[in-house]
Amino acid sequence: MNTSIRTVSSTFASVLVLSVALTATFGASAETIALIGTGNVAGALGPEFAMQGHDIVYGSRNPDRAEVRELVARTGGNAFATGQAEAAAQADIVVIAVPGDVAEQVVASLGDLSGKIIIDPTNRVGPGDDGFMMHTVATSNAELIQALAPEAYVVKAFNTLNYRTMIDPELSGGPVTIPLVGNNAEAKATVAALVEGMGLESIDLGPVRFAHVLEGMLVIWINGRSAGTPYDYHLRPQPQ
């Protein structure tokens, strides 16, 4: 083998090894995704992620319930349901699809989440004295979850829209943006790929300490709808 051919072969081998490493690190290949909860958000995201080729496991307090079996059947593929901690243990990505006021309690019950991507679509909001919705914690659920699972990669996402728009973005009448925050760039890139695979747009807005801003976006989203002016978020990129 002459020197030039040997060099090309060596370069190709190096690129192949790097490509495999990047796929493993960034989650470009199929992942196992656990949806903790089986309500509207899990019922929207699970089938959408399955259509992108991912394996779905639902974590439920009662996995044999008829509604859970129906969701598994609707999701298709290799989907199944089990207990919440068991689902999280089997997954690369864990979605905390539960009511916001129990998110901390649920995460604390899931066991060791080190090395996993945790997607947090929850919000800590409630009605104020004047009837308008308000943020009810000093920080955010995403920051509280990150503190509970310091070796996991928490990404705030899917918290600023209705579950129906997750299923059918065209209901909004135009593009819909999903803001993302989290401390790990590779984890955010993995979640962005899931977002864009659903026909939505993503935007990286920084580290997890800004998650309270995203939860605030949900507050005014709800208040706008209550005032009779419903909308969805589209953050238009400026021309470069």
Image (tube, grey):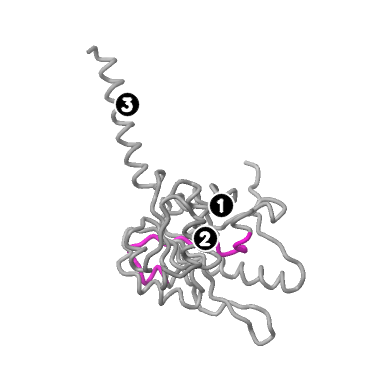
Q: Is residue 124 left or right of residue 86?
A: right
Q: Pick whichever, 20 or 2, lies toward us.
A: 20
Magenta span includes 163: yes
Q: Pick whichever, 89 or 237, lies toward us.
A: 89
Marks 2/3: CA distance?
A: 37 Å
3 or 1: tag closer to the N-terminus: 3
Q: Which residues are magenta?
A: 145-164
Identify residue for label 3: 12
Q: Is residue 218 left or right of residue 207?
A: right
Q: Residue furthest right?
A: 228
| Point 67% across, 60% down: residue | 232
2 or 3: tag closer to the N-terminus: 3
Q: Are marks 1 and 2 in contact (CB under 8 Å)?
A: yes
Marks 1/2: CA distance?
A: 9 Å
**Circle 1 — which element?**
strand
Identify residue for label 1: 202
The amino acid beneath tag 2 is Ala
Q: Please rate how many residues cluster around mark 2, counting C-alpha atoms within 10 Å: few if below 14, some from 14 to 19, many from 20.
A: many
Q: Is residue 103 left or right of residue 115?
A: right
**Circle 3 — which element?**
helix
Q: Is residue 215 above or below residue 207?
A: below
Q: Pick whichever, 180 or 79, lies toward us.
A: 79
Identify residue for label 2: 157
The amino acid beneath tag 3 is Phe
Q: Is residue 65 above or below residue 235?
A: below
The amino acid beneath tag 1 is Ser
Quadrant the N terminus occupies: top left
| Point 35% across, 70% down: residue | 110
1 or 2: tag closer to the N-terminus: 2
Which mark, residue 221?
none
Q: Position of residue 85 (x, y in %)?
A: 34, 68
